[in-house]
Image (tube, rainbow, N blue to C red):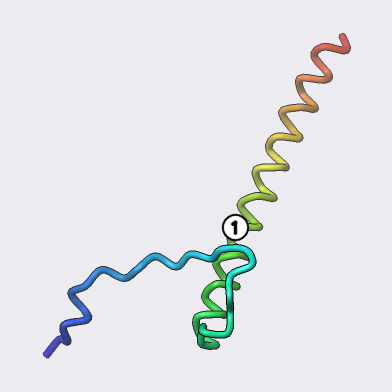
């Protein structure tokens, strides 16, 4: 028998920089750490892609 909680949509985990952490459980903290690590990886990949585009454009305009 499924519980009523199974039917409700899970709330999206979000984190606000500087947010009060004392009310979060260890599990919630670990979820947020994982979320922030994924976001860091996404940001780093975007920076690499933008640098590559900038370098290509720079080479084209030097010619």
Left or right of residue 52, residue 29 in this image = left
In which quadrant is the N terminus drawn? bottom left
The residue furthest top is 63
Crowdedness near tag 1: few (<14), some (14–19) or many (≥20) residues, C-alpha within 10 Å: few
Residue at image point 60% right, 64% down:
36
Q: Above or below — where is 57 with respect to 27?
A: above
Is 23 or 14 nearer to us in this picture? 23
Q: Position of residue 26 (x, y in %)?
A: 55, 88
Quadrant into which the C terminus falls: top right
Count of residue discs? 1
Q: Residue at x 55, y 66 (%)?
A: 35
Q: Secondary structure at mark 1?
A: helix
User: How far across and how far down the image is residue 19, in percent?
Assistant: 58, 70
In-image side of 49 versus 9 (left or right) = right
Q: Work out whether 39 lies above or below 25.
A: above
Above or below 19: residue 44: above
Q: Which residue is mark 1?
A: 39
How far from the left and from the top, in percent, is residue 4?
16, 82
- Tell me which corner region of the image, top left, top right, bottom left or bottom right, holds residue 53: top right
Residue at 51%, 87% (x, y): give it: 25
Q: Is residue 56 left or right of residue 15?
A: right
Hey, which residue is sitting farthest left in the picture?
1
């Amino acid at each position: 028998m499924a519980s009523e909680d199974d039917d409700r949509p899970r709330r999206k985990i979000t984190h606000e920089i500087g947010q009060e952490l004392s009310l979060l459980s260890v599990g919630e903290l670990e979820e947020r750490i994982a979320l922030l690590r994924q976001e860091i990886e996404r940001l780093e990949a975007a920076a690499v892609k933008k640098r590559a585009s900038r370098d290509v454009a720079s080479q084209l305009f030097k010619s």
